[in-house]
Amino acid sequence: MKDFTFHTPSNILFGAGASSRIASLLKDYKAAHVLLVTDKGVRAAGLTRKAEAEIAEAGIALTVFDGVVADPPWHVIEAATEICRERGCDAVLSIGGGSALDSAKLVAYLVKTPDKLDDIYGVDLATGDRLPLLLVPTTAGTGSEVTPISIVKTPNNEKKAVVSSRLIPDWAVLDPVLTLGLSPRNTAETGIDAMAHAIEAYTSKIRKNPISDQLALKALALLSANIRKVYADGSDLQARSEMLLGSMLAGMAFANSPVAAVHALAYPIGGILDVAHGLSIALVLPYVLEFNRPAAEALYAELSDVIQPGYRRQSDAADAAAFIAEVGAICRDCGVPSSLSAVGIGEGDLSKLAEDAMKHERLLINNPRELDEDQVRAIYASALAGVSRP
């Protein structure tokens, strides 16, 4: 067995109503002034209201930064950091989707160090201290509440990552009640993103390890069993709970056994066009799996009855094909377009997309099958045509 390391938050609180304990957790850190990082949509939906009231009742000062946007650009993070510094905040809380959580991680770090954002893109370049950090997801998708990763959109519209154990929060607080109002579309897109995390962690070439494997298997089982349910009925609290747990477990898995080509090909779509990350993932996922099949056939076969309980295993080739077909069926049943053209991508965009995808070497080295730029372009072409190719 190969040596491996495994990082995860030291504290996880899960359950319906868990977010009601946020104020008491902040008091444990003797927080006097908290910065809440969120977005206007989450706040308008009332998802932060209870936490804000309880923080005030606890005698803790609160500053709210609700300027986060999807795929947060560098200037949003820098603005939030400056506000945190100016107000003298001594703890950071985030309630929201992956963009808010990613932003909060970086704010908590940057406000305590002299580091500049441009200096810490990459792996293990952020080595300083940070403020106490509590993360509360409102979607079952990114798993950001348990990962050491923040994604930032740079001035030239590239997506870059800061990867450091310093970004892992002190508490991940998961309250499925906060996900009940998620729209069917966002439910599907974030859920498929979480499935991709589990699949890519299980097949990751560089740092695949037995702990991530078990987390990925359980995550994929929970997500695939519930995603159609929550897409059809967002009020199903039990299914919402299992989706949120699955998303977290997938996050723990890929935080230690990193994602690969699915994410490398998805990022440029969101960089060039205003396409949500989860939708970008869903648009390319079946096509990347089909490309990877020659190298990952045995591993995909192992996932065939995880994603389809009761499936009767046959041969690696048949089982891998069944697995990929079921992923495609989930995408279809949850309203994901079958072609990149649905989001405005045309033949003339493919070369630029392929060029940008190849810049994500950090991800591509984890892929079970090596890719060159021509092969990446061919995958995009398949996704544009809506036809899978080996």
Image (tube, rainbow, N blue to C red):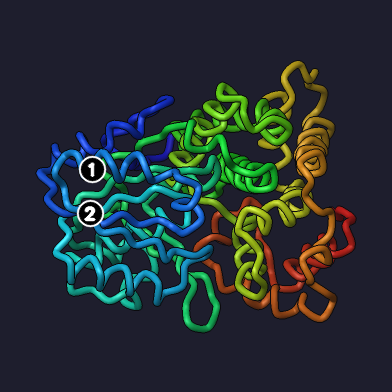
> Residues under labels 1 and 2: Cα distance?
7 Å
In percent of width and height, residue 235 lies at: 62, 29
Residue at screen point 40% across, 56% down: 38
Labels 1 & 2 near each other (Cβ < 8 A): yes
Q: x%, y% of residue 153?
A: 49, 72
User: Could you say which disc has been placed on residue 62 in the image?
Assistant: 2
In primary-sequence order, the first of circles 1 and 2 is 1
Q: Secondary structure at mark 2?
A: strand
Residue type, mark 1 in image: Ile
**Residue 146 visible in the current orientation:** no
Please indicate, yes or no, whether residue 107 appears anywhere in the rendered image: yes
User: Which residue lies at the image location 17% right of the left edge and 66% below the top edge?
Assistant: 87
Assign a secondary structure to mark 1: helix
Label annotation for residue 55 = 1
Relative placement, left or right, of 307 versus 129 is right
Residue 384 drawn above or below residue 141: below
Residue type (three-letter) at the residue carrying disc 2: Leu
- Height in image: 237 above or below 130? above
Q: Nearer the viewer, residue 141 or 312?
A: 141
Residue 244 at what x, y percent from top left?
51, 34
| Image quarter (top left, top right, bottom left or bottom right) of the N terminus | top left
Seen in the image, is 201 located left or right of residue 304?
Answer: left
Figure check: 306 above or below 383: above
Quadrant in the rendering for residue 103: bottom left
- Residue at 77% from the left image edge and 75% from the top image edge: 350
Q: Which quadrant would residue 276 be assigned to in this image?
A: bottom right
Where is residue 238? Give x, y as percent: 56, 21
